[in-house]
Image (cartoon, coloured by chain):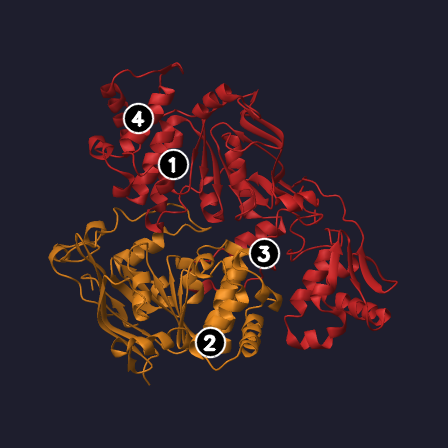
Amino acid sequence: MTSLLETRGLSVSFETPEGPVHAVKDVSLRIERGTTLGLVGESGCGKSTLGRAILRLLPENARISGSVIFNGQDLSTLPAKAMRDLRGRNIAMIFQDPMTRLDPLMKIRDHFIETIRAHDPTVDVDGAVERAKKVLADVRVPSDRLGMYPHELSGGMRQRIMIALCLLFNPALLIADEPTTALDVILEAQILQLLQSIMHEYNMAVLLITHNLGLVAEFADQVAVMYAGIIAEEGATVPLFREPRHPYTQGLLRSVIDLETQTLYSVPGSPPNLLGESIGCPFYARCEKRMDVCKSVFPEIRLVGEDRRKVACHLY
Amino acid sequence: MTQALLEVRDLRVYFPIFKGFVQRLLGGGDAKVHAVDGVSFSIPEGQVFGLVGESGCGKTTIAKTLVGLVRPTSGQIVFRGGDVTHPNRKALFRLREQIQIIYQDPHAALSPAMTVGEAVADVLRTHGLPSEGGVRIQLKSDDELRAAVYQVFEDVGLRPPPFFYDKYPDELSGGQKQRVVAGRVLALRPKLIVADEPVAMLDMSIRARMLEFLLELKAKHNLTYLFITHDLATAKFVCDGIAIMYLGRIVEMGPARTIYADPKHPYTRALLQAIPIPDPERRSTKVLPKGEVPNAVWPPAGCRFHPRCPAALPTCGWEGRDVIALLEERWLSPELAAREADAGPVEVWEANGLIARRDVEKGDPAAVQALIRGILEEGGGPMAEAIRSIRVEDRAVAVEFRPPDPLGPKEVEGRMVECLLY
């Protein structure tokens, strides 16, 4: 059986006056039905660009190459109109800050009506409101919130409403780009619990884009670690956390500050500039295990070890 | 015992809500946000004191009050033995040389139109260069000023300083910008630094470096920190003492080691439990507090955490609006909503202090009374035991609660806790 979503050699670059910025380089990933892939990395690593590239939600100066296969269908050949219908219906997306995604001048009710009728103009207002009530109950929001404006709601309620809007058409895949980063720790845990139960209820796969390794550890079945536009390492969550292979993954895991932290660690240096062409390993300058070959030869990602994990490093 | 560098006593900061003209005429215009509502703590010299809590708990308001950006409604602030609660302009100018603040977002803290060298020079121009005896010397020439800024950059690890002097904030990384901000603060040789989420905006691979850097500065310059954060893990690593805040009150305070080893307040426990653990082999189901932090305009009666608390008692402060919240939550289930339809809808219920009431225009008030009694007994938990009466008044049904037990800070096993469990 084919994967739910597959990217093949997906690359994104942005044309800028200074030259092209290579935000995503040759990324091949798979997401299976009903599972969660955690895409983790630091700011500027290209994780959000990758998420948006799947839905072709990128600015005009973006150049996309490679392909995105969803349910066996190549999305890169899909006409704009079909793509628009697919967004929200088959693949939905939620973002970090729900306040900026909801229209402040529209009642919650109208957000639902507009979304439903954009995909299905035959639904009348009453029918749309009925459907809205059903998904709101699933995200545990009282239906009287339909009559309110976004500013009248708390941050947690707003994010629940964003999730409810995503559920309207029972999409097979939800792309969640830092869905809890704007929330406090208790709310974050609440929203994650909610997402988890909804995934099961709706049999939905999730691409969780985050900088938070803790969230990935608690939530994801598979993890892909992104650095400077490439996937540095990818594999099942438990073995990857138990024995990280890429030096960047190792450094990232060591740098997490949790309740058990005894000594602080940070990865030396800072991420490279993605402007222009680069040779060698993008992590070379910061790597504590670098070799001569790393400077000049790009490390292709390949299967390493018994658990057949994908690692892009010359050490293996 | 070391002397307290800073002491805050029963600090209250309320922000009035300016309603519209008509609303003010019609009354009800005295609503206030209870941002900080009776907070006391002291910081011994040379320590790192953590103020931990979620957004809206009042931690940043305290920070702003300490540097004179917000005026306290009541209470007292004592710094190095002197009262600085309501400083005049001149006193505030001098106070700011001694208490400085580092904000969360270094990018927003630096002017985009000013080079970072100028940003630091500006501070030295205004306040003078601190010297050994505490006297501040006005620098006369631009060369002297530039040399002083170079020294500051050297101190905060922006090397070589001339390379950084003419950079604009845009050209620096997040970590470098935070160093510039730290340098600008340090240039005044303050005694107390209020660090408001200083690493929250930084990527995790460099977060540790910034924390180490702040601790190094502390050791080198004999500083005291008020470290404000929502992140209990970072606070654990950095702080000597901590105070956990919830909705304008400190709920638990004491030596960090004591509190992390055995947290007492249910809110502290909830916060600790909610932190994601970066180990997929230790996944567990979390028991989380219900709902969200309530509005600080009308904080809950009794203990402010009681509506969400998993360990609440009948005496914690149950009141009319808790009934409405229960009905709302309960009727999210269409099945229950249908079965208990005669008690609803939620909108007909009104809360006033300890009482929740609804009019019964059609039907039998006694039936509604019996229904609501059943609902509270089945789903109310400790709330049900706090009920004084459920009665029929004319054509209305009212639920009234007993007033809460008095609540105040209590010494429990080496720390202060504000909770009726102890």
Residue B335 drawn above or below residue B399: below
Q: Position of residue A308 (x, y in %)?
A: 28, 72
Q: Secondary structure at mark 4?
A: helix
Disc 3 vs disc 4: which is toward the camera?
4
Q: Which chain is red?
A: B
Question: In whole angstroms, how far apart are the C-alphas of marks 2 and 3?
Answer: 32 Å
Circle 2: residue type: Arg
Instruction: Using the rendered view, name the quadrant where residue B182 is placed.
Output: top left
Mark 1, secondary structure of its residue: helix
- What residue is pinned by disc 1? B214
Query: Which residue is denoted by mark 4 in the rendering?
Result: B121
On the same chain: label 1 and label 2? no
Is the residue marked by circle 1 packed among few (<14), some (14-19), or many (20+) residues within 10 Å?
Answer: many
Local secondary structure at mark 3: loop
Marks 2 and 3 close (CB-CB < 8 Å): no
Q: Which mark is residue B292?
A: 3
Report, in whole angstroms, how far the alpha carbon at label 4 lies from the one at label 2.
59 Å
Do pointers 3 and 4 mark residues of a single chain? yes
Residue B111 appears left or right of B50: left
Q: Nearer the viewer, residue B394 or B105?
A: B394
3D distance between C-alphas at marks 1 and 3:
33 Å
Both marks 4 and 2 on one chain: no
Are the residues tagged 4 and 2 within 8 Å (C-beta)?
A: no
Labels in figure, total: 4
Label 3 and label 4: CA atoms lie apart by 45 Å
Badge 2 and badge 3 both on one subunit: no
Give the chain of mark 3.
Answer: B
For discs 1 and 2, the disc positioned in front in the rendered view: 2
In this image, B45 relative to B337: left or right? left
The residue under label 2 is A117
